[in-house]
Amino acid sequence: EDKVVQSPLSLVVHEGDTVTLNCSYEVTNFRSLLWYKQEKKAPTFLFMLTSSGIEKKSGRLSSILDKKELFSILNITATQTGDSAVYLCAVETPGGKLYGGATNKLIFGTGTLLAVQP
Amino acid sequence: GAGVSQSPSNKVTEKGKDVELRCDPISGHTALYWYRQSLGQGLEFLIYFQGNSAPDKSGLPSDRFSAERTGGSVSTLTIQRTQQEDSAVYLCASSLGRGVSGRASNEQFFGPGTRLTVL
């Protein structure tokens, strides 16, 4: 069964700290790995990773994928209280049998709850 | 607005009643997804529509759950004979669907969700 596992489940840090969130996966067919930030109800997209070893960066956030060891990390440097959220990792995998397998679905981990204290 | 919208935002119902949840995807997005997020759990895939083709229903937890998408746009998720374990936030997302290369473009844009409470 395809699965995505995130760790830690929750994390409390102080402003200015650097955090590393982990995501490991076991899927039959891997297409890409995605990170989302969920503050209230709707997750917002952060990164999509498809190749190993290529770091994606956006401001204080960065992420990298290791397809050999089947994991990804999300780093946040100089954390701020506005970074407090649930960070979700998802793996894209082929879904139904349409278009010769060109469809896709996302399998999500349970998320990491990050709390940044002032 | 240009985002995904869902209605209602909150729904409280009694066990055994049927409920309908609505999703309006971003205009031009051919792919539409329904997810469920129970308290303390990750997002659980329910169903996926691509254009006018038959949906991928592999995530629906039971035959009490069904969904349709009319005219390739608005989607309705129906839960019949609701149970307390159906209580969750139901999220809808849309994406562009198949890109120029034929491969699905997967950046999904999420709606605000519907919080369903079954008493």
Image: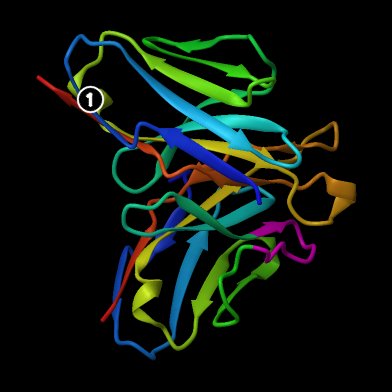
| Direction from residue A118 to residue B31 in the image, left or right | right
Residue B107 appears anywhere in the view: no
Q: Which residues are magenta?
A: B48-58
Percent from the top left, x then y, of residue B90? Answer: 43, 61
Dot 1 falls on which chain?
A
Quadrant, the C terminus of chain A: top left
Magenta stretch: dominant secondary structure: loop
What residue would you read off at disc 1? A82
Q: Residue at x 40, y 15 (%)?
A: A75
Q: Residues within 10 Å of mark 1 (few under 14, many from 20)?
A: few
Q: Is residue B43 left or right of residue A98?
A: left
Task: Name the residue at 39% across, 52% down.
Answer: B41
- Tag 1: residue type? Gly
Q: Position of residue B38 (x, y in %)?
A: 37, 59
Q: Secondary structure at mark 1?
A: helix
Q: Along the horizontal axis of the image, is A102 left or right of B33?
A: right
